[in-house]
Amino acid sequence: MHSPSPFSSKSRSPEPLSSKPPSPDYDFRAPDDWSDFTEVVGLAYGGYDHSPEHRATVAELLEPKRSLLACAAGRPCATLAGYSLDMTLPGTGPRPVFGIGYVAVSPAHRRRGLMRDMILRVLSDLHTTRAEPVAVLNATEPALYGRFGFGAASQAVSLTIPVEARALAEGPADDGPPLTLEVTSPAEAEAAIARVCRACLAERPGMLRREGAWLRQALADPPADRHGAGRLLCMLATDGAGVRGYALYRLTAGWTHSYPRYTVSVQELSACDPAAYAFLWRALLDVDLGGTVTADARPVDDPVLALLADPRSAAPTVRDQLYARAVDVDRALSGRGYATEAEVVLEVTDPLCPWNEGRWRLITGTTGADCVRTRANADLALTARELGAILLGGGSLVQLARAGRVAELRPGAVQAAAAAFRHDPAPYCPVVF
Ligand SMILES: CC(C)(COP(=O)(O)OP(=O)(O)OC[C@H]1O[C@@H](n2cnc3c(N)ncnc32)[C@H](O)[C@@H]1OP(=O)(O)O)[C@@H](O)C(=O)NCCC(=O)NCCS
């Protein structure tokens, strides 16, 4: 028996928004389990050759009743995984958001509107059931999701720090308890890592509560998925009272003119205080045999960039990271905190989710906000995509206005709203789902 899906139906969604002709009929239902997804995901991504351990964790994370499978003649042809996430929003602790992953369409069924149909079904269902007010995803291709009202809401920076540039600037002396380094396996450190993750959850918008399989996914280290790198290791920064930070990293052997030039790849680093944070970076930059320290996805304002005596040498490269969308404008905007008090009327364009269209009066405060429909003149005009970009406090309204993507209809409105929406530190999500 297949589980009933909130998105189930035989026909297409009621309002096809694509300019393309309607696709043939597909059956939409909830998958029974991950095995319903494997063929389509494998076809869409050019293979799905992860280890059985990785597949088992991905299967455990799948929430079939919140996910969607499209079938043609009984055979799966498109997938969408939905996740119930708890994410820190600006000015709040963690709040429920809806995560979308594994959007995949079999090559034989692509460009017939299936992705559009699945996204629309999911957003309509979240709206009618008044479930999570915000949806988030990691985009494989950045150009894909703007048309569906998702904006680039956080950024990540990749770093490549050569051995010659590993000097860190000194700060004021730390008079806290002395720190000790422990190097262990991630599995042994799981409980300590979980404690640090909990302590750092509210540090930035975009941080996710990671428990159970979400954390095990980050710590898993099947040999088949190492691709030539060494095993995953864990550094812990501890004092007499407990663990204050951890780093997950790998060594990859490398030699230049018979000199060891190993690569130290930092997968994660998180610490409860600046002293533990700097301690861990110092330890990573000082690993024996280390030639280069790399980190693929760090926060765009990672303090290490302020710690390095020569930050330019780290060749920081910024990219878009998490994409966010308001499912319901009023619930999304009143569900987060703001940096300043402001009042602004937003004129929102959102053809995919017409319930969001029109004017909204937003009155912001540092602990919350009100957002209600209004007939007043608009101060700013923007589409759902721009709203998504500023939802987590990352995207710059000033930049969007200068790019012509936000229209200022009352002088000064952009600066006032930008100051309210912006969050420091910048949003960042360490999890790919
Ligand atoms: C990307 C993918 C999901 C698109 O599915 P699809 O059913 O063919 O998409 P649709 O027919 O619903 O197209 C919706 C719109 O997106 C556009 N689009 C689709 N794929 C695109 C791509 N790769 N690049 C740019 N635009 C794309 C379509 O032209 C269409 O535009 P329109 O709204 O202007 O008409 C599918 O090609 C796929 O599975 N690709 C490989 C896996 C992948 O990249 N998944 C994305 C995960 S984030």
Image: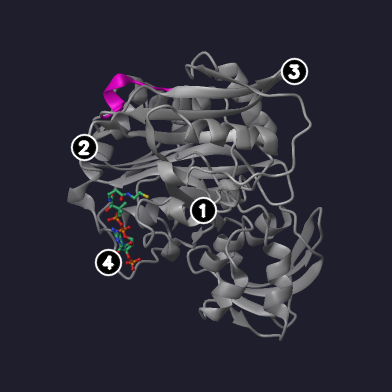
Q: Is residue 2 visible?
A: no
Q: Is residue 234 visible?
A: yes
Amino acid type at image mark 4? Pro
Marks 3 and 4, Cα distance to the nearest angstrom?
65 Å
Residue 223 shown in magenta: yes
Q: Which numbered disc, 2 or 4, marks the residue that appears first in the sequence? A: 4
User: How many other residues sit within 10 Å of disc 3, few (<14), some (14-19) or many (≥20)?
Assistant: few
- Which residue is the site of mark 2? 47
In what element is the residue under mark 4? Answer: loop
Q: Which numbered disc, 3 or 4, marks the residue that appears first in the sequence? A: 4
Residue 121 vs residue 159, the one in the foreground: 159
Considering only vertical position in the picture, is 401 above or below 157?
below
- Which residue is the site of mark 4? 21
Amino acid type at image mark 3? Ala
In the rendered image, the quadrant that contains the N terminus is top left
Q: Residue furthest top?
A: 188
Which stretch is magenta? 220-227
Q: Which mark is residue 310?
A: 1
Q: Which label lies toward us, 1 or 2? A: 1
Provide residue 372's location: percent of width, then percent of height. Answer: 74, 65
